[in-house]
Amino acid sequence: MIKKFVYGNPIETGAVVKPVEASADPIQYLTELEMNGKLIFNYEMENDDVVYGLGEANGGLNKRGAVYRSFCSDEPNQTEDKQSLYGAHNFIVISGMINVGFFIDCASEVRFDIGFTSQNMLNIHLGCPDFTVYIIEGRNAYDIVKQFRELIGRSYIAPMWAFGFQQSRWSYMNEDEVRTVVKKHRDAGIPLDAVYLDIDYMDGYKDFTISEERFPNFSEFVSEMKQEGVRLVPIIDAGVKIEDGYELFEEGRQYQLFCKKGDGTDFVAGVWPGKTHFPDFMNSGARMWFGSKYKSLIDSGIEGFWNDMNEPAMFYTEDGVNEAKEYLQNFDFNTNDPGKFFELKDKLTSLSNRMKDYESFFHNMDGRIVRHDQVHNLYGAYMTRAASEAFDNIVPDKRMLLFSRASYIGSHRWGGIWTGDNQSWWSHLKLNIKMMPSLNMCGYLYSGADLGGFGCNCTRELMLRWLAFGIFTPLMRDHSAVGTRRQELYEFGDTEDFKNIISVRYSLIPYLYSEYMKACLSNDMLFKPLAFEYPNDNFACTIEDQLVLGESVMLAPVYEPNAVGRYVYLPEDMLLVIFKSSSVRKYQIMKKGMHYIPVAANEVPLFIRRNKLLPLCRTSQCTDEMDTSMFEIIAFTDDNIEYNLYEDDGISKDYDNPDNMVQFAITDVDGVMGAVSNKTIVKLSLF
Amino acid sequence: MIKKFVYGNPIETGAVVKPVEASADPIQYLTELEMNGKLIFNYEMENDDVVYGLGEANGGLNKRGAVYRSFCSDEPNQTEDKQSLYGAHNFIVISGMINVGFFIDCASEVRFDIGFTSQNMLNIHLGCPDFTVYIIEGRNAYDIVKQFRELIGRSYIAPMWAFGFQQSRWSYMNEDEVRTVVKKHRDAGIPLDAVYLDIDYMDGYKDFTISEERFPNFSEFVSEMKQEGVRLVPIIDAGVKIEDGYELFEEGRQYQLFCKKGDGTDFVAGVWPGKTHFPDFMNSGARMWFGSKYKSLIDSGIEGFWNDMNEPAMFYTEDGVNEAKEYLQNFDFNTNDPGKFFELKDKLTSLSNRMKDYESFFHNMDGRIVRHDQVHNLYGAYMTRAASEAFDNIVPDKRMLLFSRASYIGSHRWGGIWTGDNQSWWSHLKLNIKMMPSLNMCGYLYSGADLGGFGCNCTRELMLRWLAFGIFTPLMRDHSAVGTRRQELYEFGDTEDFKNIISVRYSLIPYLYSEYMKACLSNDMLFKPLAFEYPNDNFACTIEDQLVLGESVMLAPVYEPNAVGRYVYLPEDMLLVIFKSSSVRKYQIMKKGMHYIPVAANEVPLFIRRNKLLPLCRTSQCTDEMDTSMFEIIAFTDDNIEYNLYEDDGISKDYDNPDNMVQFAITDVDGVMGAVSNKTIVKLSLF
């Protein structure tokens, strides 16, 4: 049951696709309060209420105890106190005696104080007077999430090759460096499907250009790599370099497609190329124009893109630099007021992404002039929209890989997201684990974190543990920043461990892809909190570090340094499978209840739920070579069971064809459990 | 068995008190390697070796998998990647098939790469050619720690009142604000023993001055507070304000007691008072001079101090500001080289604590001229030494409270430490838990973290969970930074919970103080890893989040948000005691093995070991009112047991008087366990 409440004259964000009639009644559940001319909604939580949602947000699965500010931010230093990350996903579910969901459809800043200031009080602070609130009632949190997902429409569907392992670095500087990366993976037997091109593949950081010097024969190189089973995925940044003669700049200026200042001139900020303009993605003409530019790269054979820097991130503006200059110029070394120094320091360190700058430029939303801060959270989403809609024209029958850094609900239909620039911190592995179900609640199914961490230096142990979770996320990409320790898997020595762990991914792809596709097609989740599958198990409902993955699997990743294993709670009897590699596995039937499972850093644990099965194919070096003609099946069953495997060509858009569903059945079961290999039940040897 | 190896011509740091003859043999265990003219020691670890030590350092109890840089640093933003905190404690123990300890007695930078670059390789990088290595062989890690503690001498002993609850804020601005803080504690029934005076009590941040305006009748105010059972603890900063007529400045300049630049002029840096000089604590005359200045405050009735900013922290130097000015002046907004901006940003953000500045001034170590960076890690330690040695003259028979931010081993004999400026992060609660035993290994027994976190905003839940661990640390202080949410306990509402939790501390003081004193007097640890008490229990040896506290208690604090309890492993049968308050308790006998214990945020759990007892006194509002004439005793025993309670006047230095030990005995035990109240065995009701 969904009700819609409209405040003021909201901008159409595109988040919602299902028509809901606006209610004329006063809003329910929420109490309105005005403070300094701004609206706040209040809701008093019960002691035991759990709050889910917020998609890409800091903290745990239960969002209580913190403040979350929806304002897409270039924030790599994601410490616990950070309120804004790269996405803005204003959907929460309160789950307890009362179950209710709120979606605040507002493209401006929204702040959720979820029991931070006062332990049982939820406050929602609205940054602008024009927005829509959807209130969803349901039987439980999961039911509410599914209704919400219907409301916002089917998620973007990635091509199957995008489930392969992907290697990135800021940046692989030229053809030869890419060749070496591919070769070293192949030599070590570490499967690989894609290599990323970060900003340095461009000519002077100019979007849709290619450095002649670094990549002299781009389309030939793209096809050379494709022969190796490797797709190249170039980055596209939001900002357009100001440079006379540069086509994108000239056209954007000529046709008025850039964001403008109050005086009508094009807004300027310093980003990677130096001085840039920002395309006005809020304008349909600008979207069509920018989107059409992807064609040249697609014509070169490119099948996937990542859109970056689209919060938009700004390193500096001229105003900012001048203010800082003035402050520093006026700083008196002889001062005895320490406050002066901290004022100065603040000026010097806050040159980037200043609110003042976000308030200084405007969009032309097909006639309606809107100051940027009022629609800030849509900017990255609409860049993704520009690309997605263009792909529908350029390659109408083909799925392209597309994901973005900044996002707003609605963009889940246009592309996936990665969770932005993180760090090589154990706590960011934990954040990755806890964030996946929240992302799924908000429609982001094709997603993942930078495995091993983007910033800082990664250790071998952290990489192995992160991969042992990362092999389950649809987007599985190792990415790291310039200046950090090299993070390609072969760089950590003893490559056998990495070959083994990635081989597990490749044998799991049929299951992962199948569960992902079924979740996309039915507006369901791929990663679920235990609470969603075992709502009557009170203890299971408190667990944040175990997840249900699709219908058959429960995950319990290790995320502590120097750990030899971890505690696990089983809400029912399950079969523990420890993968040493795709083919070397240990099995143990485990009883409902608490356990400590030893897991070495080069092992991958997973649990198979009772009366469920897991199909595995033989591992391969890339998805093009995947062989799904034969499956090995691990089942934990005392009864006849079935499994629907979704299988298609992985690239066309014939998603809904019923022929894509292949049924596996295990019949004539007489033992407690067994491994079914090509329909022959084989007893497993347990450890 | 301790061996000593001398390299070059080391500075006498004062870390070691026990004479050890220098060995003429080549060094053992460690392999020497020279790189860029600097020495590196290598040691190849076994897969299962655990590395303990490093005192105040980031990370877990097992230090493997990271780099630690001993270089006292003003680093409040303690994320996982930070290599330097406020202290420099170069003692590590490798524990496995081989057990060996290394103490690198070197006052310059030392870097420990403990399996970071290569998983099994320990590298110790020496920042200077003059140092001493002590190699300690022992039966196990605990044995090696005890030998090391003998080597470095008896730890500083705090007065008993310093075991009371202490409240701090940067800053309580005047008498009335302090009065209000005290009154609000008393009104809420929250016990309190001390209130801290941060930098604003001074006149213009000038050490050893008092603002006439804010604290017009200081000594009267000190005694007024003492009437309330509250001691005031003022801060002393390392830097001395440059101001004509200010006695400290004039004397320091006149008698050449400040650190000097190469050209012989006094070194200048910007700190709280603006331009300051740094006393040359490496010089015995300067120490005596600076130490003597504490007398005026002691004469006003002050009984405790905290020495701060003594890494030394520098906000800026004139050179730094000028360089930044030049960079910013030359910054071209029209640049298309993003690197230029990041260079600029780096210049602007690294004005504070620049290595270049540390390399630009000198000490006169009683004749030997040493550049600061060569003895950097001794600076704060020697400030503490200055105070400690002065106290021995000013109040020879009385224990003073004294702790420091920066430290080097040796300073554990002169004062305690707090763990510096942390944040209101759950991960810093966890860091606090894991750091306590490491601090103890290095001799720091009187220590603790800023409970609730210094920077960022604390929630009620985080405060309660942090207190539930903090009530066990000798230094128990709530401290928070200007600009953060008020963090006095009564500010969080529902003060009953805080009254209860602090009341538990006050009933525990006799046990805590007794175990602390016994640990000090016998060079033992107060907080021990389970591995030290249960070395044959392999599983116990892997646990980092449970600690043994003294002889009777095991702790298992909850450190996750929204948790309803936690997993606990018991290496033997134990009695779980859940304190709702000092007098309302629940008991449960628990079997050796794994458990999940539910613990509400307003409860304190602890475990009593088999055949051990815990004495509790009645709670009080301050230590002055503590009544130890009668104890309630909780015991978990099936046999006659004894406990030695250390009891003295808590303020004199008659530590070693054998009369200070009171023996408790429980005899004629016939039940499995019971509570003994005044020698009467009472059966406990279990839940």
Image: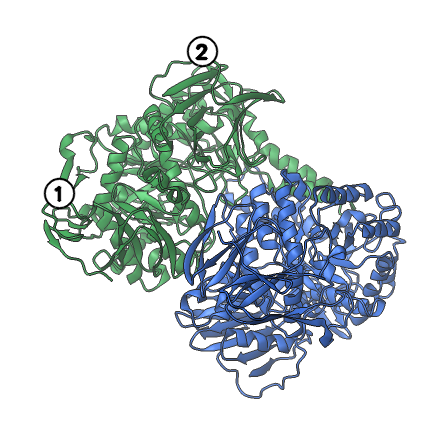
Chain colours: A green, B blue
| Closer-to-camera residue (B549/B178) | B549
Q: Residue at x 42, y 13 (%)?
A: A23
Q: To which residue does mark 2 refer?
A: A24
Across and down, in percent, residue A198 comes to 39, 44
Q: What chain is tagged by disc 1?
A: A
- Amino acid at the residue labelled 2: Ala
Q: Which mark is residue A665?
A: 1
Residue B262 showing in the rendered view: no
- For the N terminus of chain A, the image quarter is top left
Q: Is B557 displayed left or right of B326 in the figure? A: left
Position of residue B541 measured from the top left corner of the image (x, y, whole percent): 45, 67
Q: How many marks?
A: 2
Q: Is disc 1 placed on a helix, strand or loop? A: strand
Amino acid type, callout 1:
Ala
- Location of residue B575 with respect to A199 vertically, above or below: below
Mark toward the start of the polypeptide (1 vs 2)? 2
User: Is A226 left, or right, of B94 in this rendering?
Assistant: left
Looking at the rendering, in which quadrant would you find the C terminus of chain A? bottom left
Residue B664 in picture, x, y percent from top left:
63, 69
Farthest residue toward the top? A24
At mark 2, the secondary structure is: loop
Q: Nearer the viewer, residue A437 or A608?
A: A608
Q: Residues within 10 Å of mark 1 (few under 14, many from 20)?
A: some
CA neighbours of label 2 inside 10 A, class few (<14), some (14 to 19), many (20+): few
Residue drawn 32% across and 46% down?
Answer: A571
Asked if badges 1 and 2 are on one and the same chain, I answer yes
- Against B219, residue A47 (above or below) is above
